[in-house]
Image (tube, coloured by chain):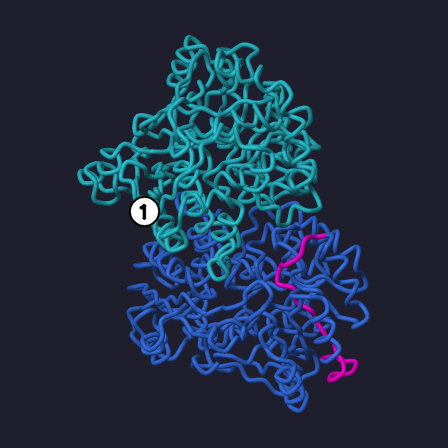
Chain colours: A cyan, B blue
Amino acid sequence: MLRELEKLRITEVTASDVRFPTSRDQSGSDAMNPSPDYSAAYATLHTERPELSGHGFTFTIGRGNELCTAAIRSLAPLLVGKDLRELVADLGGFWRSLAGDSQLRWLGPEKGVIHLATAAVVNALWDLYAKAQGLPLWKLLAELSPEAVVAAVDFRYLGDALTREEALELLRRSRAGREERERHLLAEGYPAYNTSVGWSGYSDDQVRQLTRQALREGWGAFKLKVGRSLEEDRRRAALLRGEIGDAPLMFDANQVWEVDEAIAYVRALADFQPLWIEEPTSPDDILGHRKIAEAVRPIGVASGEHVHNRVMFKQFFEAGALDFCQLDPARLGGVNEALAVLLMAAKFGVPVCPHAGGVGLCEYVQHLSMFDYLAVSGSLEGRRVEYVGHLHQHFLDPVVIRRGCYQPPSRPGFSSEMRPESLSSYAFPDGAAWQGKPPA
Amino acid sequence: MLRELEKLRITEVTASDVRFPTSRDQSGSDAMNPSPDYSAAYATLHTERPELSGHGFTFTIGRGNELCTAAIRSLAPLLVGKDLRELVADLGGFWRSLAGDSQLRWLGPEKGVIHLATAAVVNALWDLYAKAQGLPLWKLLAELSPEAVVAAVDFRYLGDALTREEALELLRRSRAGREERERHLLAEGYPAYNTSVGWSGYSDDQVRQLTRQALREGWGAFKLKVGRSLEEDRRRAALLRGEIGDAPLMFDANQVWEVDEAIAYVRALADFQPLWIEEPTSPDDILGHRKIAEAVRPIGVASGEHVHNRVMFKQFFEAGALDFCQLDPARLGGVNEALAVLLMAAKFGVPVCPHAGGVGLCEYVQHLSMFDYLAVSGSLEGRRVEYVGHLHQHFLDPVVIRRGCYQPPSRPGFSSEMRPESLSSYAFPDGAAWQGKPPA
């Protein structure tokens, strides 16, 4: 049951540019992104009560993080002085007031830097809301009535694919069996797959050792970065397939191919029986993904970490261009828009396997997938949350993995609050971590 | 004939936040953008020769312009120290070095604030190149060999729709008759249509008077903003149709409708025989535009001012979702990407009627359409460049309109250089224009 909230004014919004020098050890490297410095543009919503604040962020890979940080400051006037109680009474209106600001909207609309910053601010508000309710976000979302969930969604431009009424009906139908699913979730956790074993920059020995260690820890599904050269990819895929036996194996090309090239390349990797090929080409190319999906079946096509809004996902679903939806609540405009995508994915029968890794994305997406299981799709079939083993130590409520499954967070909020000492040590460019060695 | 360029180092890139308080008189108002302050994030490439600098900008409508200005500064290190001669020897490589920077790319890819800033910087380079050649940009582009044009284009992700070889073939074919077309262009100018008569915020009397004045000046095609209410739109359309007789009339909805709503609404305006309906729904909704285009024929569907890159245009063309392509070289990544879209439009037989207005967009797009006529499509059929009568006085080489046609610029460059006194008076927030009255 949800509490009646008290009046709680947002007094200030601060923004921090936080960067981790991950390019130094090649973690996070892939065919498109050879040398990322994993970064967060971090928003804090301060309130009248010093002990209660909301924390959210978007993720970038280094240079340009200053622009997302500045964009949080550009959005701040739309929040300062507002009352949490009134904002949560109209979460859809709150979202539209940010994404639809009549001048800022021109910078997207609903894409790029301004949308990334919208994610940070929107997610900070959900963190604040969940803390004010004393619940982890997944539980708060599951406690919301179908009407309240739908009220948080902006259905603009979705009318020809999903109406408010269809979404309500879908949420009402999935109430059946929820208690049973919650018991299962609390006992077993939510299934995950492991991306930490197969970065492009890792040597064969590193891949082998990391995979063996992951198998010992109970992991049962793995992802390999591909797309630098077919020969190399086949060698690495054989290595990984040899280590993991029949376990699900995913390939991720990080957008490096033309459409026709993707089809030929994926066919040449088909004997390793990948579950999916991820980001085979430009993330904007809906029709290209459809061509690839039709050509490489039964291998699935996955994308989403760069799919920038619900209108793009609508078309991916309508076109039958995606077999796995990898939504990212730091790329979409935060929780509100992620809800829209979860609802569409459920309607179109596409499993959601969120994009994670980065900085704090695992912390974010576990909440959305657990909510999806309890209240939207009601299913774990074909669903796995990405897991990457980096940077969790910088969060107050880091993810907990057991036997390859995310364990439901119990601490109130969105698990999105970073440790104050991390915020200061990794502040760019003045934090201690950046003082010894300037970024490339 | 083009000159051999001398070595010319770019010594500094400066960025200016320039805003015009257009919301005070409602010029530029429409159903989605009720109160814009037309703005430019302005880039200057300074060189070793003080008399030779490159000027480019992107356009926004007010708040958030500071982010595009900051993004120009984030891109600056990719240009400073480079030699113009080497950059123009590999214009495609230059473009990819900006749009494909391995860390900045995450902020898009190729969309939003970072892509808007890319447009400013790329266009500034073309301005510099044209000045160094002593030619207006349209003439420089027409003087480039087919091989040189194609070398400036990034064909990445276009392979399934347009190859480099097809583009070359297309450019070679359109060499026939070019001299004749150039004579025609110099004598008559390039056809335009007038948007200045029908802003949403204008009264019926204003619309009537502006239309009569435009007719007296020789204008023969007009655009009306629609989408606030059907009753009001029918009244204003009847008024305008009554004034202009059988002249082409275009409607612009600025993204306000759902797909099904657009179809019904446009049908209810069909008796005014509009040539096109512009931006009927979300600019990201390729499949939605196709549904609308199929349903409202023979009324055409137009879009482009928010279509953010060549991959999106590729799909619009492939899907048959656009009857008129309104590319915008301040939204796309500047001239290089506009060339890609001109080539695809020519292949798919879609007339290009560029988006203009804003700040300096008329100055920009005239060059591209004139080049298209001379060297790409070779046709004026169905083609008109948008014209809006604002803010030209702030440019050193403002557009010249005669009898409703753009007259080819003769001054070297991209017509993109603003007067120094305008840059300083309208600097935000410290310029004189902003000191009396702070922005809303």
Q: In the rendering, at what x and y percent does residue A313 appear?
A: 61, 41
Residue drawn at x 51%, y 46% as measured from the top left: A90
Which of A424 and B256 lies nearest the eye of the viewer? Answer: B256
Residue B296, image quadrant: bottom right
Magenta stretch holds residue A249: no
Q: Say above or below: A175 vs A18.
A: above
Q: Is residue A243 visible?
A: yes
Residue sitting at x 46%, y 58%: A104
The residue carrying mark 1 is A15
Quadrant housing residue B192: bottom right
Give x and y (percent) for residue A181: 57, 17
Mark 1, secondary structure of its residue = strand
Chain letter of disc 1 in the image: A
Indicate whether A339 appears above or below B399: above
Instruction: Residue B252: say if magenta.
Output: yes
Q: Position of residue A351 (x, y in %)?
A: 61, 27
Residue A362, compared with residue A86, is above or below; it is above
Along the viewing direction, whichever of B345 and A156 lies nearer the viewer: A156
Residue range highlighted in magenta: B240-259
